[in-house]
Image (spheres, grey):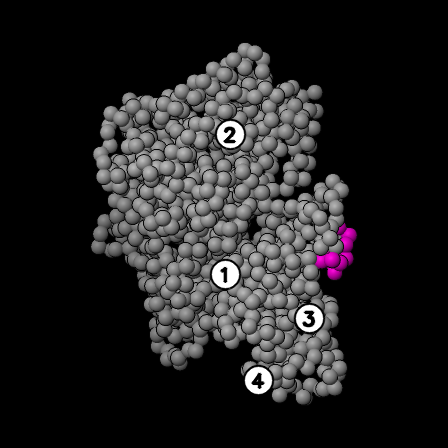
Amino acid sequence: MSEKPVDTTKIRSVKKMRDLMTTYYLEALSAGQNNKQVAWITSGGPVEPLVAMDIIPVYPENHGAMIGSAKMGEELCAKAEEMGYSFDLCSYARADIACSVEKGGPIGGLPRPDMLICCNNICGTVLKWYEIQARFYNVPLFILDTPICHTGYTPDIAAYVRAQVDEYIVFLENVTQRKLDHDKMTQVGKLSFEGQRLWQKVLNTTAHKPSPMSAFDAFFFLALIVTLRGTPIAVDFYKELIAEMEQRIKDGISSIPHEKYRLLWDNLPVWHRLKWLSARFSGHNACLVADTYTSAWCGAIQYIDEDNFLDSIAQAYTRIYLNIGVDQMADQVLDMIRFYDVNGLVMHSNRSCKPYSFGQMDIMKTVREKTGLPVLMIEADMVDPRSFSQAQAETRIDTFMEIIKQREA
Amino acid sequence: MKEIERFHEAVNNIFDTVLKIQKTNRKIIGYLCSYAPEEIIHAAGFHPMRLFSSKHEIILAENHLQSYCCSVVRGILEDSLAGRLDFLDGTVFPHTCDSMQRLSDIWRMNGKYQFFADLVLPAKLNTNSAAIYMKKVLARFKEDLEAAVGKKIIDTDLADSIALCNSIRKHLLTIYGLNCRYPGSIRGVDLYALVKGAMIMDRKEAADLLAGIVSHLEQKVYPDSPAKRVILSGSLCDTPDIFDAVEAAGGAVVGDDLCTGQRWFDSAVAEDEDPLSAIASRLMGRVICPAKHAGLTFRAKNLVSLVRRNRAAGVIFLMLKFCDPHAFDYPYLKEFLDKNGIKSTVLEMDGLQQSQGQFSTRIETFIHML
Amino acid sequence: MICAGIDIGSITAKAALINGKDLLGTLVIPTGYHHLNAGIRVFDTLLQQNGLSRTDISFVVSTGYGRASVDFADKTMTEILCHGAGAHFLNPDIRGVIDVGGQDSKAILLDDQGRVENFAMNDKCAAGTGRFLEVMARALEVALDQMGEVGQKADNPSKISSICTVFAESEVISMIARQEKRENIIAGIHDAAAARVANLAAKIRIRGPVMMTGGVAKNSGMAAALEKRLKLPLIIESFSQETGAIGAAVLAAGTG
């Protein structure tokens, strides 16, 4: 997330975003000195009660992305393998687990958690990962179990998750020995809703041709809606970012110099090859204008009732992209293809993320049948470069772009 | 013993087993993991049958699942797409790991069989709200089955099915106990066939045969065995060669925590309670799959106690390649064993492509180390 | 009492004779297709070289992949146990053994009696084995036994990141296309393979002194890369390739 592709015209907000993230991490790292408690939470977990209770949320997945971008993934993943963790396991988890022991990585490890919050709406991996960390740090673990909605959201699921939202609050009150301030909760809920609404608006700007920013920029700007969701910082920043994007559109400034082809990206970024991928595609005048990943942090906004926040998050956190059936995921991909008017789909078959990657081939088939668009699949891993063959990816990308060029000629 | 032979026949020729059951006018429901409530399926008049990884090369499933998906998930899809499971009238997918979840989606989208159900069980098994939810999921599943057969499942039928499944559990537990006391009283491959067969065969037939085997085995007198006693730990074991390799090296398997072993039959459903609640309680309380959560050290404590109870000298971990939940647990389980002075080794399994040489080298060396 | 050990590996067959504490002789021949024939040939030739006949031998232990095919052996033992025993025989101080053979690589932890305390073995993947080096040598058109020497001349070792042998090969091919220096690529290959082996060693928390055995121990480049990764010096005996056979003979003397 700290790496940004070379742009002809730099996005000004990048610097501000970097500063905000630095401040956030400095605050998190000095939490102990300021008598603040730290909670580690999964990227898809309900952070709002933490914000309302003045607990600093820290995201091991965001940390994983930083490790990947800093190209420190290989070393840390190998360290985890020495500890007995299989090479086939998620590289975010491997890197983070090794980092806890080694205190390594780009920021010398995350601040020690006082509690762990794990929501399994993104995968079953986080459950195992957080169990490991709960044993390592010997701190309480709360699991928000969000049953996967293969074909829909049943009343049974609703009742179960809603009950757990209450258990979550009780857990936090027990660990902090403080009561939740419900007025503050309402306020944080509204800010979270507003942040998500604005983030969607940021992403929507790339429907413009040529696109003022790319998915690579979105991967970078995503960090705020993940880490500072529910704060005015995220809301203010995204307002500015939208303004900048609108200005770029007005001034005719595009993400790549000669946008001729527009592409949609699926799955997590390949953090250790962002620059390379961006350059490879822009070399073909192709811009990755959107992706299925960054929109996951605003995709369930339709279920949020900002006036009744705690009641509504049960549904909003359960029905996110990934915690639904592959057919529903395919529908969302088709919607994005239409909305962003793209010429092709690029799928990252990510060894680290089974729930995101298994089913991709069926989505690919649906997309081909319904749109006739070319689809490219690249085999890689979000953090560990040892599962990636650049030479092979190069050939695949060039061939894919040739096909698109012929088709659009 | 001819009763044991029946199990081998059933395991080696699933298709004939199926034909026999179909002749009794019963439809067949395949299930994917040991959290499937067989009792309810059985009470609805269906025959519950566990699906195992394929014995064939992966060809058709390559178009749906990448190479880093485990051989069980890919193999079952392969068998389905190749038409080798056309005898199924339906399938049930209990919630387990991420790969199984996605297999369920792909399976449903390919819609090959009449009946389909996702059993989205809780992943957390140690809270009250999860227990309430578990029972609701089972109740909904019961309704789905009722809709499929067009009649209600009455409580006495459910009670009968529970009693039948319990008797299989009891017999298998007795045989495991005997084998533990007198290693060699039954061969490992036979034990494997009994458990696998009981997941495939007509349940009444299996229960009756097992009762016969128990009384036969209990009559004999066994000498003390010098074999080195080991426990198998992991997900699935569909490789009977393991037992032979352990025995050839002078060892004996005296217990396991496998999904295709003791975890499947290790506790009974209470027969004096409301049937659905009793089934739910069993699923909440039994030894967990690592894709589930029931505290931070549940599996390690269970494993150590299994070793102690069965006086085992070591543990062989069977790791199915690409099985994330088990791979995540391995380092802590090993550490727990180390702390308790219990030796262990790990074998990586990947469907058909077992490297026989490496396999026996590892087992022999390990048994020698004990 | 003279005892014999026979080690039938995937590429070479080895035999060793010992009498008490004395090593009488060893021999290495290519295995070929027929395991039993290789066993007979290596055994009989070695006996002949030492002016002995089969009746002089009290006990024979066979080991290695083809150990079961040696029908005249009194007992079979796994190569892990034999490499441990062999290393201990050659140098009783040894506590760790790293055996890199054609098919697989192993890290072994020994107690002060030369008994195996723990071990780790590569999984199905060929990275970090002799096979991996062989594939790469072919892609680079270098003789396998020249790799060590050539790799040592590297001024700026290339970085091979892929673990998978097939991926790594395509990486190497693209390096060739970019005209990277052959010695640098080879040094990169050694480091990649060494990383995998070091990983095995770390899994069992290897401790020194460590002996490297197996055919790949003859590759000085690989050994140097491994020493760097392990941060431990490696003891390499001239009998590195025959250690398993020697160990088998030692174990034969112990059981016979």
Q: What separation in Å lies between label 1 and label 4 (alpha carbons)?
A: 33 Å
* Residue nearest the viewer, comparing A194 with A79: A79
Q: Disc 2 designates what residue?
A: A219
In the rendered view, does A187 fall on the left or right side of B313? left
Instruction: Residue type at mark 3: give it.
Output: Ser
Q: Disc 3 designates what residue?
A: C238
Q: What separation in Å lies between label 3 and label 1 (alpha carbons)?
A: 26 Å
Residues rendered magenta in the picture: C139-149
In the rendered view, does A361 fall on the left or right side of A191? right
At a point 64% along the width and 82% down the height, the residue shown is C22
Q: Disc 4 designates what residue?
A: C256
Q: Residue C205 got which mark?
A: 1
Q: Are marks 3 and 1 on the same chain?
A: yes
Q: What separation in Å lies between label 2 and label 3 (alpha carbons)?
A: 55 Å
The mark closer to the camera, 4 or 2, is: 2
| Magenta residues, dominant SS class | helix
Q: What separation in Å lies between label 4 and label 3 (alpha carbons)?
A: 27 Å
Per the image, label 2 sits on a secondary structure element best described as: helix
Per the image, label 4 sits on a secondary structure element best described as: loop
Q: Earlier in the sequence, mark 1 or mark 4?
A: 1
Instruction: Residue type at mark 2: give it.
Output: Phe
Q: Is residue C145 magenta?
A: yes
Q: Is residue B339 visible?
A: yes
At a point 67% along the width and 39% down the height, the residue shown is A391
Q: Is residue A369 magenta?
A: no
